[in-house]
Amino acid sequence: MTATVPEPEMARILIVDDDVLAAGALATIVAADPGLHVVAVGHSAADVVRLHAELAPDLAVLDIRMGESSGLDAARTILARDPGAPILFLTTFLDDEYIISALALGARGYILKQDHRALIPAIHAVLRGQTVYGLEVTGRLAKVGERPTQDLDAIYGERQITERERAIITEVAAGCNNREIADRLFLSEGTVRNQISLILEKLDLRDRTQLAIHFWQHGGRLPEKG
């Protein structure tokens, strides 16, 4: 695709979907936001890998299923080369294996195409450093958590996870960034950052995405609102 040069402050977005019409519609929606610029549109996993290497976008928005390969395969290749690359999956498939695989890879989010109004807020949230789950995805993660391999309280007890650390973990699992966690728990951002590093060390986890997955897989629950 041929695109105009974005303004310096605009975030550069790569969109890849094997459905040409869907990809075009997504590009139109994203391009309508004054803070976002669509640098390219692709239609295969090979396109993802090539375009990402060529253009170094601020965010790649990928479909999960794309012909013989998949968005997961493409993300795996991209993240092996650039572990910090932000990737947001946008798909029609509400599948436990896809969700867990996407987050375990290090994707920054997983939302459904059916909820098209969530796309732009999700993109901006990921660009701010948050991890984003659609409402339906959060529900699936909760159901995965109904089948824990070990009780979360037992794990936290064994690993000496404090009450404050448990509260921080819960906020991470809810998709909050460090600033939001600091505001909610009346802490400084530096304290939150240091606490998360300590939690990851205690639980032998690599990053906050793995921390969120660990929470859901072992029966974690978000507190009731209200």
Image (cartoon, rainbow, N blue to C red):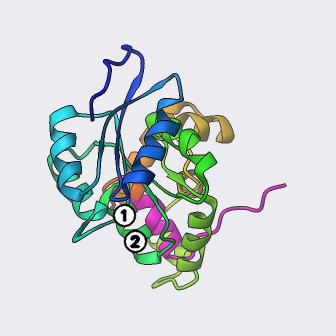
In which quarter of the view is residue 100 placed? Answer: bottom left
Is residue 108 in view?
A: no
Pointer 2 residue:
98
Residue identifier under label 1:
64
Tell me which amino acid carries mark 1. Answer: Ile
User: Disc 1 on helix, strand or loop?
Assistant: loop
Horizontal placement of 96 versus 140: left or right?
Answer: left
Quadrant of the rendering where the N terminus is positioned? top left
Is residue 137 left or right of 159 when viewed as pictured?
right
Determine the secondary structure under disc 2: helix
Residue under the point 45% across and 65% down: 213
The answer to whether residue 223 is magenta is yes
Q: How crowded is mark 1: few (under 14 residues within 10 Å), some or many (20 or more)?
A: many
181 and 9: which is toward the camera: 9
Highlighted magenta segment, given as a residue range = 210-226
Q: Nearer the viewer, residue 120 or 133?
A: 120
**Dot 2 and dot 1 residues touching (CB under 8 Å):** yes
Q: How crowded is mark 2: few (under 14 residues within 10 Å), some or many (20 or more)?
A: some
